[in-house]
Structure formats: structure tokens, C-alpha cells
Amino acid sequence: MIQLPPLGMGCAAIGNLYRFVDDQLADETVAAALANGISYFDVAPHYGFGLAEERLGRALARHDPTQHAIVSTKVGRLLTSTDSDAVERHGFVGAPPLEPVFDYTHDGVLRSHEASLARLGRDWIDILFAHDLGTATHGEQAAQHLRDFLDGGYPALRRLRDEGAVGEIGIGVNEIAVCQDLLDRVELDVVLLAGRYTLLEQDEAAPLLERCERLGTRIVIGGPYNSGILVEGSARAAASHFNYAPPPPEVIARVARLEQVCDTYGVPLAAAALQFPKRAPAVASVIPGLVGPDQVRATMCLAARAIPDTLWDDCHLALQSQPNLETAP
């Protein structure tokens, strides 16, 4: 079993998510993460259409030559050429002229894994996740993609794990329902759940967390800030994101209630958001997206901030007067 550290780094931002990041800043981010004790990095072909994997691979080769760091990446999309000259595509700015195409088949998973190895410059990947299965991503095509995965993609993951090409396998998704569905059908070592168990969304994931604890399936929590709103706060919500989109009024209202509680305790909202998921026994690691050494250092401060136990109860109560969010990534 791979021992995941409590805090890791999500690498979408060094793939130019929402804004341009140059190669030097990406390298400095990874170097700062390693220097501050962050040893787990999660990436995907989708992040900047290969750009994040390439940057992470180069940085780790330079700053972690013994390959001490843990790396997870994902399958489910293949990258193909595009003639689009749009500055932003799928949220990524200034990315290479490539387009992600969904492919959860046996061959597609093996091809994706091989391409990731080349971009990362590694001969082994610690954790390989199937990326973005579920209805919120695929709509009417969700059932077909799930069949492709169960019939071919999942056996390919098992084969890679059994042959020692990867350490562990799992899924990386934004939806709770597809996690429960797959746990009914297959064995998963790790589930990466992004944005569905946060300070802002506390209750819907509880059955999944309890089930994973019983099964021994570890959970990695991505998106602990719900795409940024739990860092920017209600006052700056107009410039922020919730689930990769502008935050709706009901989300801003819930964030304001959480801010009031945190202000009462003198605790930054971002610190509470970062630390909240680790209170669940099934959660092995939390992986906020990071870009820039300053953000790395600020994150370490947030992770070390002392938080009274009573704050968690008060935050939960503050959300009860407003119904749970209808969430979709």
C-alpha cells in the first residue's frame, strides 16, 4: 500500500488552468512544494493537454532525481491534434494545439498510460486513476463510457497494476454516484473525489466516506476550495469560481455564513477549508491546486493553523438553514 501524505499538490494550475503560467513559474512551484515537504503530485493528460504532465516531469527530474515523490495521473482521455486557435479551451489558456478525446477502452487506457509515461519522463506511475466518469461530465454518453471502462478500461488498469507498471488504481471524479456505482462492481485502491466533500458541501459524501472506510479504499480529496470560492470568499466571489464556473448566489450566501463563523474564531476561511476533509478517517490526502512558491508557503501556513474543534460544529450548523447544494462540476 502506498503511504499517501496528508497534503499533496494538484497540478492543473501548472497546466495553465484559467491563466497563463510560464515554464519557470511551474518549475519553481514544484521545487517549492518539495522543499516544503509536499511529496505527492496529482496530474492528468487533460491539464493543459499534456502541458502539466510535461512540466511536472521536467521539474521532478531536476528537483527529485531519486524519484522519491509520489505521482498520480489519469486515463480516459487521449490527446489528438486540433487546428483551433482559441486562446482558452476547456478552461486552459495558451495550451498546445491538442484536443482531449474520451476513450475508456482497454486500448485507450494502455495508450494513455504510455503517453503519460513519456510526458512525465518516468517508467512507473504510483497511482493511475480513470478520469471523469459519470453523468455530469458525459450526460447521455455516460452509460456507454462506463461500459467501455468496465469491459475494457478497468481490466487494463488491473493488468497494469498486476504487471507492476503502476502501484495502485482507482478513479478520479467529481461525482459521488459514480463512485458508489463502481464500488458495487469493481475493486478500487483509491478514489480521488474532487469538490464533493468540502467545508461548503459536508453531508452528501458521508455514505461514501463510511463505505470506503469499511472497504479500506482510501480517498484523496481534490478541490478543497471548490475551485476557488473558499479562498476568495464572498466579497471576491465575482472573480472566483465554484465547480469551474461563476458561483451562483446561493453558494455565495453559504460562503458568507462560513466566513462569519471563521471570523468569530479568528481562523482564515481557507485554513478551515483545507483542513476540513482530513477529519474523515477514510481521507488519506488533500490536494489543493497550487501555482507559485508564495502559494505553496501560504498553503503550508494554512495547513498548520490551529483550529478549535467547536468551529467545525458551528460551520455545520451555519449551513443547515440553507438546503444542500445541487452540485455538478
Image (cartoon, rainbow, N blue to C red):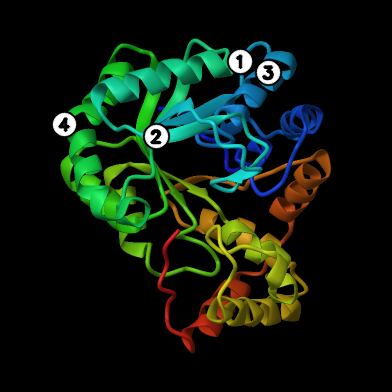
Point out the frontmost of discs 1 and 4. 4
In percent of width and height, residue 99 lies at 48, 33
Is residue 256 shown above or below 218?
A: below
Residue placed under numbered mark 2 in the picture: 101
Is residue 135 shown above or below 112?
A: below
In percent of width and height, residue 70 lies at 55, 26
> Regarding mark 1 in the picture, which secondary structure is present there?
loop
User: Could you say which is closer to the camera, residue 310 or residue 142?
Assistant: 142
Name the amino acid type tagged 4.
Asp
Q: Earlier in the sequence, mark 1 or mark 2?
A: 1
Name the amino acid type tagged 3.
Arg
Point out the frontmost of discs 4 and 2. 2
Classify mark 2: residues with Cα within 10 Å, few (<14), some (14-19) or many (20+).
Answer: few
Residue placed under numbered mark 4 in the picture: 151
Q: What's the mark number on residue 67?
A: 1
Asked whether, in this view, residue 76 is left or right of residue 31, the answer is left
> Regarding mark 2 in the picture, which secondary structure is present there?
strand
**CA gap, disc 3 to disc 4?**
35 Å
Q: Earlier in the sequence, mark 2 or mark 3?
A: 3
User: Could you say which is closer to the camera, residue 139 or residue 255?
Assistant: 139
Q: Residue furthest right?
A: 294
Residue placed under numbered mark 3 in the picture: 58
**CA gap, disc 1 to disc 3?**
12 Å
User: Could you say which is closer to the camera, residue 58 or residue 135?
Assistant: 135
Q: Residue at x 47, y 23 (%)?
A: 126
Residue 100: name its quadrant: top left
